[in-house]
Image (cartoon, rainbow, N blue to C red):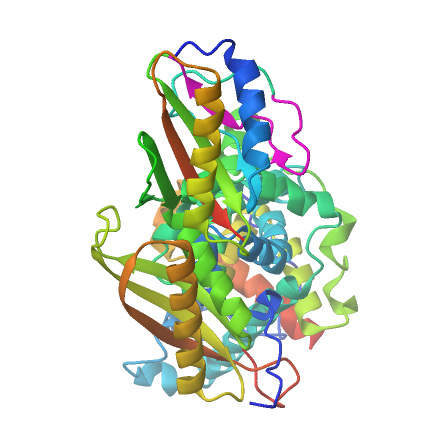
């Protein structure tokens, strides 16, 4: 997708995701993503960021993965859709060569 | 190996085969283990065995008392002990399958984990009040959108409530939460009440 | 309904509820389990291991294994005995490792003061007296007695885990029982 440095992008996306109403946590990505942002993403205001990077970016496969916890106030399905839309909008703004797949996984509610 | 039997008054308690009409303390202990069935007349009719059996039975009662006392003992001296245990467990391992959510966005793959669904079912129970949900099971092909899914929960209900009322409230609460957060096609919610919880000190003589 | 529903806290929940929730990933429920049985498992570990700095380690290890195995626990109402079995295994592993490293067959440091009154007759309660009597048993006897009478092991299971012939286990238990009976009758 060629969007520049993965760690910078990861950090930026963590900010984007944390701004979506209903998002309570961003969980660290798991080993399933081939390459992840290499450095620890700075604490995102209002969002608990764990030691592992919260946004997985697989440049080669063109996949962006995010695991979130949502508040009970919103619908988990709706928040997941809002998050994928927000990420998609952000990425389109970067004018990528090809549109990446955006994986959003709700890992907790409430 | 040690064989240092404490030296005691030889009349204190007779526990050798000579005192037990040929039986050993082991045999008597095994006899007690199988609730003295089938009855053994040579034990039941021996005064020596009966004395030893009584002592063994008291010992067994005291074992239960030891376990209860251990359980009542203050857990760890410091809080960090509990924290260390909790930090050592792998929470991710319980996420389960990724249950798909539909998306209008091309190229977006959305899902909610089974673990999150179980969590919101538990939370639904907690909001009803007066009961606690235990294990939660999702039966059905949750990976196929629209496939029928049956929810089964274990529950413990607090004392003094009408179970049918509680069950009906909890099913409503679970259904509402699942409709709100997921896209599961829930065809049934079964609630198994496995325990009536009696608050401590509420009824005299009732022990869990 | 006008009557407020009595609060029903997780801390008061029965074993099956707690084990079920923890199996499903509820860390809060697992924490209640850790607090409820931590003291019991520490006492148990101390009896199997003897006074040892490995007690905490063995108990923490027990809980971590328990968390991993909770989803496959057949009868969630039996959490206590199940935890005691896991703890027994963890302790026995350590006893065996100690045996391999030590020249003495059953090296064991002196009893720590927290294991109760030194003399059984001074104990205030029956449970205290029994705890003191247990701590006074020779290590191998104590281990066998604790596994049989407190953790619910069979003779065969004790023999297999401690790597001793069943006849030896029976002999040790026989002596342990006599010692325990004598100590406890004296307390009475």
Q: Residue at horizontal 38%, vertical 32%?
A: A103
Q: Position of residue B171 (x, y in %)?
A: 39, 73
Q: Is residue B2 above or below residue B20?
A: above
- The mark total stands at 0
Magenta segment, prevailing SS (helix, strand or loop): loop
Q: Is residue B71 in view from this perspective? A: yes
Quadrant for the C terminus of chain B, please: bottom right
A64 inside magenta stretch: no
Q: Is residue B7 above or below residue A106?
A: below
Q: Quadrant of residue C11?
A: bottom right
Compare residues B173 and C96 and report the one nearer the observer.
Answer: B173
Q: Is residue B176 above or below residue B193?
A: above
Q: Is residue C152 in view from this perspective? A: no
Region of the chain picked out in magenta, as a range: A41-59
A57 inside magenta stretch: yes
Q: Quadrant of residue B23?
A: bottom left
Q: Position of residue A43 (x, y in %)?
A: 67, 28
């Amino acid at each position: 997708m060629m969007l520049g440095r993965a760690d910078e992008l990861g950090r930026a996306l963590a900010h984007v995701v944390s701004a979506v109403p209903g998002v309570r946590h961003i969980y660290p990505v798991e080993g399933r993503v081939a390459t992840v942002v290499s450095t620890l993403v700075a604490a995102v205001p209002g969002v608990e960021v764990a030691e592992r990077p919260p946004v997985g970016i697989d440049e080669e496969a063109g996949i962006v993965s995010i695991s979130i916890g949502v508040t009970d106030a919103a619908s988990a399905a709706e928040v997941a859709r809002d998050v994928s839309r927000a990420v998609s909008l952000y990425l389109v703004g970067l004018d990528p060569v090809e549109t990446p797949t955006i994986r959003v996984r709700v890992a907790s509610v409430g | 190996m040690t064989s240092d039997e404490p030296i005691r008054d030889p009349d204190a308690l007779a526990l050798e085969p000579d005192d037990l009409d040929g039986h050993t303390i082991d045999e008597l202990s095994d006899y007690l283990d199988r609730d003295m069935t089938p009855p053994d007349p040579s034990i039941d009719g021996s005064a020596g065995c009966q004395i030893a059996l009584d002592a063994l039975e008291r010992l067994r009662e005291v074992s239960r008392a030891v376990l209860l006392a251990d359980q009542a003992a203050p857990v760890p001296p410091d809080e960090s002990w509990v924290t260390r245990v909790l930090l050592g467990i792998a929470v991710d391992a319980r996420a389960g399958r990724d249950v798909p959510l539909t998306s209008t966005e091309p190229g977006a793959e959305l899902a909610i984990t089974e673990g999150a669904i179980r969590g919101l079912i538990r939370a639904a129970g907690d909001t009803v009040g007066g009961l606690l949900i235990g294990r939660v099971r999702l039966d059905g092909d949750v990976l196929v959108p629209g496939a029928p899914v049956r929810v089964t929960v274990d529950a413990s209900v607090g004392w003094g409530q009408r179970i049918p009322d509680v069950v009906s409230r909890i099913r409503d609460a679970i259904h509402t939460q699942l409709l709100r957060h997921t896209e599961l096609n829930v065809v049934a919610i079964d609630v198994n009440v496995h325990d009536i919880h009696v608050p401590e000190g509420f009824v005299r003589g009732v022990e869990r | 309904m006008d009557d407020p529903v009595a609060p029903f806290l997780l801390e008061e929940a029965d074993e099956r509820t707690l084990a079920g929730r923890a199996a499903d990933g509820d860390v809060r429920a697992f924490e209640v389990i850790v607090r409820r049985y931590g003291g019991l498992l520490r006492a148990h570990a101390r009896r199997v291991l003897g006074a040892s700095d490995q007690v905490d380690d063995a108990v923490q290890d027990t809980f971590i294994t328990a968390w991993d195995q909770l989803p496959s626990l057949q009868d969630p109402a039996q959490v206590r005995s199940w935890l005691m079995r896991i703890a027994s295994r963890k302790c026995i592993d350590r006893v065996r490792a100690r045996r391999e490293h030590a020249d003495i067959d059953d090296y064991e440091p002196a009893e720590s003061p927290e294991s109760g009154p030194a003399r059984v007759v001074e104990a205030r309660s029956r449970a205290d007296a029994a705890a003191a009597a247990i701590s006074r048993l020779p290590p191998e006897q104590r281990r066998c007695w604790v596994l049989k009478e407190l953790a619910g092991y069979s003779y065969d299971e004790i023999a297999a885990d401690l790597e001793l012939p069943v006849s030896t286990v029976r002999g040790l238990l026989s002596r342990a029982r006599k010692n325990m009976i004598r100590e406890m009758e004296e307390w009475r």
